[in-house]
Image (tube, helix red, strand yellow):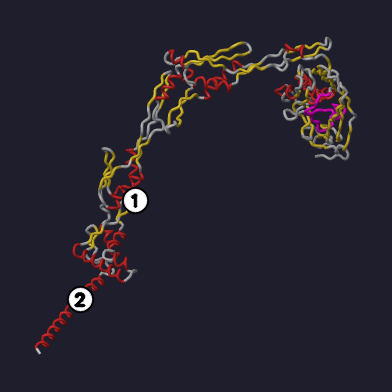
Amino acid sequence: MDSNFHSQHRLGIGTTLLLAASLLVLVAVGVVAAYEFRYSDRVYRGVSVAGITLAGLTLDEATEAVRDGLTPYPGATITLRYGTRTWSLSSADFGVAVDAPATAAAAFEIGRQGLTASFAGPVASLWRGLRTDLGAQWAALRQGAAVTPSVKFDENRLAVTLKRIAQEVDLPPREGTLMISGLEVSGTPGQAGRLVNMAATRNALAGLISAGRSGAIDLVVDERQPAVLSVDAAVAKATAMLGRSFTLSAQGVDGVRRFAIDPVLMSQWLSLTPKPAPDGSVELAVELDDDQVTAFVRNLAGQVDRPVFDAALDFDRKTNQVVVLQASQVGQTLDVVAGVAAVEAAIMAPLSSQANAAGGGIDAGEAITLPVTIMVPRVDSAKVAEMGIVELVSEGTTYFAGSTRERVQNIVVAANKLRGAVIPPGEEFSFYKFVGDVTAANGFVDSLIIRGDRTETGVGGGVCQVSTTVFRAAFMGGFPILERYPHGYVVGWYGQPGLDASIFTPDADFRFRNDTAHYLLVQPEVDTAKGRITFRLYGTSPGRTVTLSEPIISNASAAPQPLYQEDTKLATGVIKQVDWAKDGMDVIIKRTITTANGSVKEDRVVSRYRPWRAVYLYGPGTELPPGATGQ
């Protein structure tokens, strides 16, 4: 019985203790639950930021509390150092401000990180997260939890602050220089500079600012090397160059002409150019100013050059002898490009061993030969007897009686420009080469010319009479015609159509080749009294005969009806004709050439003439002929 009693007694005590323990657990759970419920949307007790208590505040209230308590943000003092210099910078220099929302959020997360991180995991993870959070809450309650404020800074203000400091530190590199004063050469070596590395310094500052810590950091400064550091080689080279002098010689027709280049002149030609060296550095190269050397050589060319003249010849029909109207002249020209190259090569060449041994590198007379080209005349008056100009080869004649005084003057001027012309064997005759531009500056005057589809007043009317006559002489001599153009319409001055040659300088020329083995002399004769112009070609006859066919005319077309145009410069009742009607046609003339050995060659000249209407000018109010239409 006693045993049973004792057993029951022990059972009662155990039950009581279990109930008590359970009650305590329930009480503890209730307390924790009540605590968690109380702070479910508030910062836990014990949490503070920079001495500001946030316990029991909602997230928005905590944000306002942080903003109110840390504005303006006290921040930390940061010292920048470079060598012996320092700059003490406050938060205001960087525009530092507290990030209140981020700071409040960090405070709110105290005691909540573990459960939040493990919420999506298994039950065991949830339990570990809960224990972590309860531990953090208990630690905050017992000893407090200080949250470091989150800060932000103004990038623009930070950049301005760094630029201000950089202005005191930055130093541009000094380039090496070389000075030439008279014949004295001096050099200043280059010196390195420095430049604040803004990006690297900014990153170092940002780390301290974000941590809210005071401290000192070194200013990041990069060294800047000059492009030209050493100038010793340039000084030595320039000094050596100015210790030399040169004698230039130009061998011409009349002997040798000599010129000098002394150090004073050479000093004006020196130029200094930075150039990359083989080791990757930059060195100062001493060179010559090409423009100045070219100007110097071109000036020498003006003293050396002389034109080449062909002899101008005539043929005396009474004595059958060649007469020299103007003697030929051998010409010479200095090749400026090659001369500049020769001068620059000599000056830039290393000093000769003899010059170095002579003392100080001075060479008082280094020689430079200038390239001179001798130009021999095509027609040499000293070789007239060898030219074979002994007889009449061919001739051509046209008539200009009735021409205006101005037209006659142009014919005389153009013919005289051909006087004395000589064509060597195998070469070509060019009307433009001898006559030149048909302009007032070249001696021609206004007269009627063909321009487009009208006959009008212009410079040089009548010159085509000369080209046509030369063409006929060459054509009748059997010479190959290289370039020839017919007129736009049939011109009455030239007689038989198909044997005219129009020129329009410089675009339309008349050319033929001297295909004989001897020189050919062109001799004009103008008879203004009879209105006749003749060109004779003297040389050695190749023994050929030339015959021409009758003109073959096709595609004939009648001239259009006359055109009447009002001219306010004319009086009433006055009618003035300025263009004459000409029928249009195509004309072919065949030329048969029989050579001395009996071979026969045939060619032809083709001319296409447009129909040309008569044009009349009339004064205002003038009664026109029946059927005439005025404009």
Mark 1 vs 2, N-terminal side:
2
Give the Cα distance between marks 1 and 2: 54 Å
Residue 574 visible to the viewer: no
The amino acid type, in three-letter code, at marker 2 is: Val
Residue 379 % position (x, y): 73, 16
Q: Residue 173, how many percent across, how many down?
A: 37, 33
Residue at 24% from the left image edge and 73% from the top image edge: 33
Frontmost residue, 570 versus 54: 54
Query: What residue lies at 68% left-to-right and 14% top-to-bottom?
Result: 329
What secondary structure characterizes most of the magenta part?
Answer: loop
Q: Residue 154 carries which label?
A: 1
| The C terminus, quarter of image | top right
- At label 1, the amino acid type is Asp
- Between residue 518 and residue 97, name the one nearer to us: 518
**Within 10 Å of the Cα at label 1, are there few (<14), some (14-19), or many (20+) other Cα atoms?**
few
> To which quarter of the image does residue 419 belong?
top right
Vertically, is 125 above or below 194?
below
Relative vertical location of residue 66 with respect to residue 208 in this rendering, above or below: below
Question: Which residue in the structure is indicated by mark 2?
Answer: 25
Q: Nearer the viewer, residue 263 or 431?
A: 263
Which segment did they paint magenta?
Answer: 478-502
Residue 387 in the magenta stretch? The answer is no
Q: Is mark 1 on a helix, strand or loop?
A: loop
Compare residues 502 and 476 and report the one nearer the observer: 476
| Whole-percent x, y for residue 256 in the image | 59, 11
